[in-house]
Amino acid sequence: MNRALFVCLSGLLTSVLSVQSMAAETTIKQLPVNAIHPTQSAVGYDEINYKIALDKADPAKLFTEFCENNGAGKVRQYNTHSAITRPGSFTCQSPYGTYPDAVKSAVIAPDHQVYLTDGHHTISIFRDIAGDQNFTFSVRITNDLSQLPDMAAFWQWMEQHNQAWLNDPAGKRVKPADLPAQVGMQFMADDTYRSVIYFLRSVAYKKPKNAPPFLEFYLGDWLRHHQPVRPGELKTKAGYAAYLARAANALVNASGSEHTTASPDSPTLGQSGKLDKVNVKKLDKLSEKGGKLSVLFGERATS
């Protein structure tokens, strides 16, 4: 073989192997939840509070969700004294990690810490229910990036691969060093529009099968600029419902070719699943008995 060709092929093979080495085989890690770091600065408090209310009202749902998110199937046994902070107080159908696809994803950084790439809202729910107590939680390592030269290279890789959202609730850039140290409402900021978009799912948009990464944050940013919340509007159920109706109409009446942010690289509203008309039935259901807004404000009243 020609020596120059051999060197070229050898270099190409080395590059391929180097890239592949970053992709971890399916590895499930059980970690103290306070050792899991976020890759975004904010979550939607109202979405989280709504789901907390559901879980507190239905322990079977809580423990099943906890087991499932740990890759252990449904809950097998629990009682009134069970708590997610005490693993011996309940049992799941299978050992943690049995169903890896159900486990939230994370990566390992050059500082050898674990950074969550999916599940910030889920962990925030469990942390609030657990109070100040720590507990063990499973993550699925998708990439081991510990061999990158430094954390600057890590965050560059994360953004290039759509694994981090480095914007605050006002849409301003966040430095990685300013991200919260832990996942949870007590550490992360509230992005009101992230919750609004959650409530508008199937009302004004339908999440595409191959949705753009951070779809809800992109749509929330669009609402922030095109249909801002009025001061105090979300303090009451009626006010919240009125805003959701306005936001839904603004979204469906916008052009599908319009980008969600000022960046031409952001997904368009059409790519984000914008509907052509408001699903009025599902919008009204939010305020009915058992609807998301009814549950949310019931939880607020007792918290």
Image (cartoon, rainbow, N blue to C red):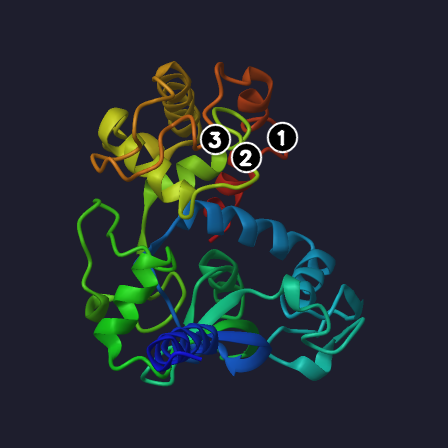
Q: Which residue is mark 2?
A: 294
Q: Secondary structure at mark 2?
A: helix
Mark 2: few, some, or many residues within 10 Å (few <14, many ≥20)?
Answer: some
Q: Which residue is mark 1?
A: 289
Q: Secondary structure at mark 3?
A: loop
> What residue is drawn where x is 38% and y is 14%?
253
From the top left corner, tell me how far across and down residue 18 is, in percent: 41, 78
> What residue is drawn where x is 54% and y is 79%?
135
Which label number is shown at residue 160? none
- Pointer 3 or 2: first along the chain: 3
Left or right: 71 as drawn, with respect to 137:
right
Q: Judge whether 258 appears above or below 68 on screen.
A: above
Q: Which residue is mark 3?
A: 200
Q: Nearer the viewer, mark 3 or mark 1?
A: 3
Badge 1 amino acid: Lys
Q: Judge whether 81 appears above or below 256 on screen.
A: below
Q: Nearer the viewer, residue 57 or 107?
A: 107
From the top left corner, tell me how far across and down residue 291 is, in percent: 59, 33
Mark 3: few, some, or many residues within 10 Å (few <14, many ≥20)?
Answer: many
In the picture, residue 192 is in which quadrant?
Answer: top left
Is the Cβ of the residue at disc 2 closer than 8 Å to that at disc 1?
A: yes
Q: Split into 4 quadrants, where in the image is the N terminus? A: bottom left
